Image (tube, helix red, strand yellow):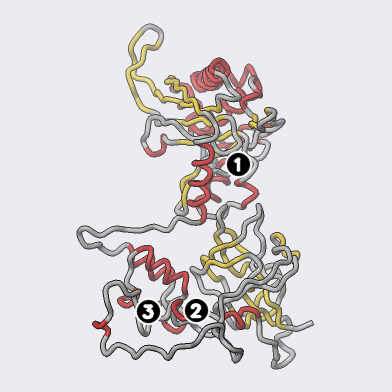
């Protein structure tokens, strides 16, 4: 077995076929340990760190940051016996594919563009590679065999670049070193590569260089183009599928949450909770979990010929991140105590903000909450995550005049919204569920004492 081992991009779960290399955590020449994170990759689900399959020394990195790579394509080569002297390795699939890069894709560093991996399904630390398939390659130039059509002599080059007509395809900027994915990003964003100074290897232009240029002032009448990919692309597909599949109904309820606000203040003052990050969203989540116990049909999914009622609540919390909206979920949240629920919600949101949510945490949700109140918004009509029967929107808490015990007083008030799949939840059930959530938030201590 060769001591130079090529590591293909693994299947990161849920049938994903490609990933974008966000950041290399190692460089050529670095010594790596087994399971050491070597690269950060973004898929349509999340950004994840991939660990090394072997210990050794990095000999090649086939794709720069910003590249989109198919599952099964080699991304890095590691010498597993770096102390055994010089190693002679056969040409890699990545190196062979580099020769076949189409000219219009631009100048590239030798050996950095990977080709398809050989067939086979390989177990890896974070999943499995693709099934055996025929490797796909770009069309190669004609070899010594007879051509299928006569080859005409090439036309004489134009005397000057100005001779090109407006209809001609734009020529590749001379002297610009950038990978095809970076060039495509630049085209999408309208960034001129010829005016950029590359920060990558050998002065190559990276994705970050293009992204930074995008933030520069744009001339009047210009436009900005943002590629739709990764998390944003998956979110868009899911929202369209849900909006045009499940008949949505949304109901609203405005409630006095003054006692909830005071209960949280008392909780924060106790020694056990002083270091815990808590917000009104915690009590909204607890209210949902208790209401689902009374109305389990809310925690279900439509399966065409039947309604599947879930036996546990995988509670999704919508989180806005730099890569788009994600809804990771807390598995079996109904079994957690209030403190455990608080810790789980804090960890979930922090992980999502850092872009470290795993694909497993983004699947399997059964009921979700979206908190638009953090943006100062009163309420909304949220779209159901695919496969879920209901979603609660939690609005901003405001001090407002409110009739309390027969007198008008200033109270803390918020508006709840509940969107639900009308194939599963009728108006009566949706109304009762929302009423119970509101009742809990009106007097959480009494509800907790009554229900546990």
Residue identified by numbered label 3: 172
Picture disc at residue 329: 1
| Residue 261 at x, y percent in the picture | 46, 27
Q: Secondary structure at mark 2?
A: loop
**Secondary structure beneath label 3:** loop
Q: Quadrant of residue 3?
A: bottom right
Write down the residue under mark 2: 102
Q: Residue at the location (46% across, 31% down)?
A: 394
Asked if the residue under mark 3 is in contact with the one under mark 2, i.e. CB atoms within 8 Å, the reply is no
Mark 1–mark 2 Cα distance, whole angstroms, equals: 44 Å
Q: Nearer the viewer, residue 110 or 349?
A: 110
Of residues 399 and 53, the one drawn nearer to the viewer in this rendering: 53
Q: In this rendering, which labeled residue sits more in front, label 3 or label 1?
A: 3
Residue pictured at 65% horizontal, 30% vertical: 300
Image spot of residue 272 (x, y percent): 59, 37
Which one is nearer the viewer's eye here, 86 or 285? 86
Mark 2 Cα-neighbour bin, 10 Å: few <14, some 14–19, many ≥20: some
User: In the rendered image, which quarter contains the N terminus?
Assistant: bottom right
Q: Residue at x 49, y 44 (%)?
A: 319
Give the mark nearest the N terminus, 3 or 1: 3
Going from the N terminus, do you reach mark 2 or mark 3 first? 2
């Amino acid at each position: 077995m060769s001591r130079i081992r090529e590591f293909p991009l693994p299947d990161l779960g849920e049938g994903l076929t490609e990933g974008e290399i966000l950041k290399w955590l190692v460089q050529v020449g670095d010594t790596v340990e087994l399971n050491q994170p070597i690269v950060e990759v973004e898929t349509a689900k999340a950004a994840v760190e991939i660990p090394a399959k072997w210990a050794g020394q990095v000999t090649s990195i086939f794709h720069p940051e910003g590249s989109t790579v198919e599952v099964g394509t080699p991304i890095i080569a590691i010498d597993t016996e770096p102390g055994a002297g010089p190693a002679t390795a056969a040409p890699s699939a990545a190196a062979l594919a580099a020769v076949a890069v189409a000219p219009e894709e631009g100048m590239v560093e030798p050996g950095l563009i990977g080709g398809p991996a050989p067939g086979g399904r390989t177990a890896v630390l974070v999943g499995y590679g693709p099934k055996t398939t025929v490797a796909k390659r770009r069309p190669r130039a004609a070899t010594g065999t007879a051509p299928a059509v006569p080859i005409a002599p090439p036309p004489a080059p134009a005397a000057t670049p100005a001779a090109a007509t407006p209809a001609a395809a734009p020529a590749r900027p001379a002297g610009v070193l950038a990978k095809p994915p970076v060039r495509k990003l630049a085209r999408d964003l309208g960034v001129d590569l010829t005016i950029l100074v590359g920060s990558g290897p050998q002065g190559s232009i990276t994705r970050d260089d293009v992204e930074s240029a995008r933030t520069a002032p744009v001339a009047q009448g210009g436009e900005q183009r943002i590629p739709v990919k990764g998390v944003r692309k998956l979110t868009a597909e899911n929202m369209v599928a849900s909006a045009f599949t499940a008949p949505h109904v949304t109901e609203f309820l405005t409630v006095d949450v003054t006692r909830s606000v005071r209960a949280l203040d008392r909780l924060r003052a106790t020694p056990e909770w002083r270091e815990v990050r808590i917000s009104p969203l915690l009590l909204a989540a607890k209210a949902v979990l208790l209401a689902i116990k009374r109305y389990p049909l809310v925690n279900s999914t439509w399966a065409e010929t039947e309604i599947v009622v879930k036996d546990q609540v995988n509670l999704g919390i919508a989180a806005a991140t730099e890569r788009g909206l994600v809804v990771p979920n807390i598995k079996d949240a109904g079994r957690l105590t209030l403190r455990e629920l608080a810790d789980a919600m804090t960890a979930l949101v922090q992980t999502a903000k850092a872009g470290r949510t795993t694909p497993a945490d983004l699947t399997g949700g059964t009921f979700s909450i979206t908190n638009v109140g953090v943006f100062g918004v009163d309420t909304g009509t949220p779209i159901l995550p695919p496969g879920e029967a209901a979603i609660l929107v939690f609005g901003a808490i405001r001090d407002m005049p409110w009739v309390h015990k027969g007198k008008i007083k200033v109270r803390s008030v918020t508006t709840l919204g509940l969107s639900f799949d009308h194939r599963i939840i009728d108006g009566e059930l949706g109304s009762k569920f929302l009423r119970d959530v509101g009742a809990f938030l009106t007097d959480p201590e009494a509800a907790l004492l009554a229900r546990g």
